[in-house]
Image (tube, rainbow, N blue to C red):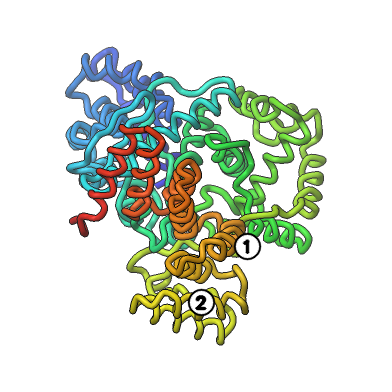
Amino acid sequence: MTGRALRLAALVALAPALAAPAPQAEDAPQRYRQVAVAMRHLVDEEMDQARALVEPLLEAHPGDPAVAMAAGVLRLHEQRYDEAVRLLEASDASSPGTPGDWLELARKAREVTRGYQRAEGRHVVVFHPKGKDEVLVPYLQEMLEAERAALERAFGRVPAGKVAVEIVPSTRDLARLSTLSEEEIKTSGTIAICKFNKLMVTSPKALLRGYDWLDTAAHEYVHYVVTRHTRNQTPIWLHEGIAKWAETLWRGRGGESMSPYSAALLRDAARQGRLITFAQMHPSMAKLPSQEDAALAFAEVLAAVEWIERRGGPGALVKVLDNVAEGRPADQAVSRALSLPFDAFLAEWRRWMATRPLPEGGDRELKVLRFKGDPKHGGSHSEWADIPDDRARGFARLGEIFRERGRWEAARQEYAKAVSRVGGRSAALASKFALASLMSGREGEAAAVLGEAVRLHPGYAALHVNMGRLYAKKQSWQAARDAFLLANRTDPFDPEIHAGLARAYEALGEKALAEREQRFAGLLAGGDER
């Protein structure tokens, strides 16, 4: 169920109590009105307001089913799942379509997170399965602290307290924690969700080649901040546009996530009149019919926020959010912030999308998320499938045979034949050729192919690993560290990344970080976990 549907179900459940006459206690109608208001706050994730109402009610009326329901939903939002289940079971949770929906969510959350470890930082608490997902924790905490500081500068304020992050091992578990189906998650490429007062992030190990998990977590944190800034009144197009624009603030400027592929897709759709409407994006991007549609929708809303920034200048986004927080619809909020009729804004935005310059570097093909164990999403995907030339594929496969036999020079020669036909179009081929060149003592050749390939495929981890190898060989330790960190942003479960970081940190005099990375390398090299 959506949050709004859950709210309505809860209020329906409370209706008999609100309407019931004596012989209830004299304060019962007021109590139930307070419960109804608390439920509205909870669905809008206004935690302080909900807590201020529910805690005194629970203390005074622990046996009241309506109070137990509100307290159970509060505990669900506080990640106190055992208590949430107990309280919701004590409410009228057996009634279909009422508190039972919350009870089901609480039970699933308790089951998914059973045995999780807790890692608490200054403003971030990460809950994760025991084992290899531990390697994600310090990077998540460091990134979210940086994103929090950047958003405080950009928006003027961020929520107090600590944000909860739950790492889930699979899309199946993400579906169980949320109100989306697993099919919707995979079809749209949804990999993380902000809902129920927490961020839910799928572990990169659920995918064949990982994904940009740090930017993704930053994106969800922006949702968390915007929800609270606007009392959950922001429509999906504006919510997603701001989140997409701001997801890179932790490492640079806003709006840096538009790849050449997305920009070209956007420009073509704008010119051909086949844009996805704001109404089609509602109630969630996750319900769009394909990853390509989702990519186009995200590009559209990112361009909308770009245009708000360009048209209104510094502070324009804050003005829009403040107007939404005051209860104005998004079209009025944008119009007031820009001193421009909303129809005029839309016309300018469409012209901007049709003429927006294409970025120089970045992915030029759709980065389809390929989930492990799912043939529809890459389970049988060949690493050479992105080479369009038959002869080049043949050379690449022959090079692979030589590589497996340890014949690096012969492998290099075959890979070189393939590269001569298709250039850096294939990230896998460029990576293999670079490694064979390194192993054959041809560092200059490796550097040349890696430079082009990284520009075209900045999210392909193996290219950055080979860059790290190249810099480590030259003892350029700062550059090696940076290359391995870029690889870690996509594929943090490669032990070589952490071993390389350990060497780089040791050489740079960062002993504590070197020890941490050496421990992570050992943890990841220890074989499959349960």
How far apart marks 2 and 1 lie (CA) works out to 22 Å
Residue 16 visible in image:
no
| Residue 428 rendering spot, x and y as whole percentages | 49, 68
The C terminus is located in which quarter? bottom left
Callout 1: helix, strand or loop? loop
Q: What residue is drawn where x is 58% and y is 75%?
A: 419
Q: In screen coordinates, is 432 left or right of 29?
A: right
Using the image, tell me which numbered label, if any, was put on residue 39: none
292 relative position to 77: left or right: right
Depth check, front residue: 361 or 324: 361
Residue 364's disc number:
1
Residue sitting at 43 percent across and 61 percent down?
186
| Circles 2 and 1: CB atoms closer than 8 Å | no
Which residue type does callout 2 highlight?
Answer: Tyr
Instruction: Estimate how packed mark 1 is, as few (under 14), some (14 to 19) or many (20 or more) residues with alpha carbons within 10 Å.
Output: some
Q: Residues within 10 Å of mark 2 (few under 14, many from 20)?
A: many
Residue at position x 71%, y 32% in the image: 332
Q: Quadrant of residue 151?
A: top right
- Mark 2 lies on residue: 415
| 211 up-or-down from 139: above or below | below
Residue 224 % position (x, y):
47, 33
- Kind of residue at disc 1: Arg
Is tag 2's residue or tag 1's residue first in the polypeptide sequence? 1
Residue at position x 67%, y 25% in the image: 319
